[in-house]
Amino acid sequence: MKTKILVSSDSGIDYISHPHSVASLPSLIKFFEIEKYFDYIDMTSDKFFNRLRYDKKVKPEIVPMELEYIQNDINIALESYDNVLIIVSNFLDYGLLFSKLKEAYGDQIDFYITPATGFILASMAIEGDRILKEKKKTLDDAKAGMDLVYNNSGMLILNPQIDIHISENVNEEKRVEERRKAKLYIVDSNGEVEIKDRDRDFIVSIIKNYLDRVAEENVIPFIMYSSKYSYYLKLLESKLLIIHKRYKNIKKIPASPNLGMKYGENIIVIGYIKNLN
């Protein structure tokens, strides 16, 4: 049986190369009732985070795509595939939609809900797709393979209270010293640990230790960011990543709006997935 995979857009799958049999399922970004955008299609990650930075009054809401749009994607997929597997992060509640889709499509559709997001979720979808293309592999096999990817991954999320655009004509070192507090989150299959409001020296030490540990293991490292012009991203690239040669070509992709809503508008994520091959 041929299976089409739809994975929620907070995976960032649109920003990396992936098989044609894996497609993005956009979220709906709502700034006001009449101002709505499909994630990535109408509003890129960069545009979303810029809106948050420059429009402090706005309080966006991110919700699953409406039923009729999901059905349209499923109907198109079923013209060429036998069934559809929808993979989503539990950042959004798809429960009601999934029950309606199950009523409409029965065994032609299945679901996989995970705490994963970002590049880890994208990698899980690609791994599930790879498994389903093997002979005699089932949806249960694919879900087990995706679980394995998730259980062997992790993220360190940095959220500076105030970021600096690298093009600003200011004494950046002084600005960073004056506004150097940030929150850190360590997120993996064991849960989430928050480290609140620590100074830059402590943050750099934590990040360096994290990178050192990751460098010693057989992993695929990655970075997600809310702004490619972030001073902190530049600092990370020039002061820490350069220490390890294996980080020279590290994969960098935009963070999703969902990540920004949960962890902050200035986030930088350093993550890894263990190489299980």
Image: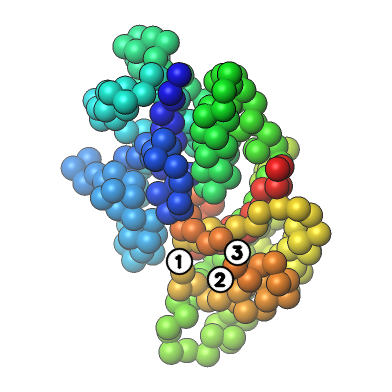
Residue type at the position of mark 2: Leu
- Are dots 1 and 2 in contact, CB under 8 Å? yes
242 lies left or right of 254: right
Residue type at the position of mark 1: Ser
The answer to whether any part of residue 16 appears in the image is: yes
The answer to whether any part of residue 194 appears in the image is: no
Q: Earlier in the sequence, mark 1 or mark 2?
A: 1
Residue at the spot x=45%, y=51% of the render? 17
Does residue 28 lie above or below 137 as drawn? below
- Are dots 2 and 3 in contact, CB under 8 Å? no
Residue at the spot x=70%, y=67% of the render? 246
Which residue ends up furthest to the left in the rendered image? 34
**Which residue is the site of mark 2?**
233
x%, y% of residue 31? 28, 48
Where residue 4 sits, quadrant-wise, is top left
- Are dots 3 and 1 in contact, CB under 8 Å? no
Where residue 135 sits, quadrant-wise, is top right
x%, y% of residue 235? 60, 77
Residue type at the position of mark 3: Ile
Q: Earlier in the sequence, mark 2 or mark 3?
A: 2
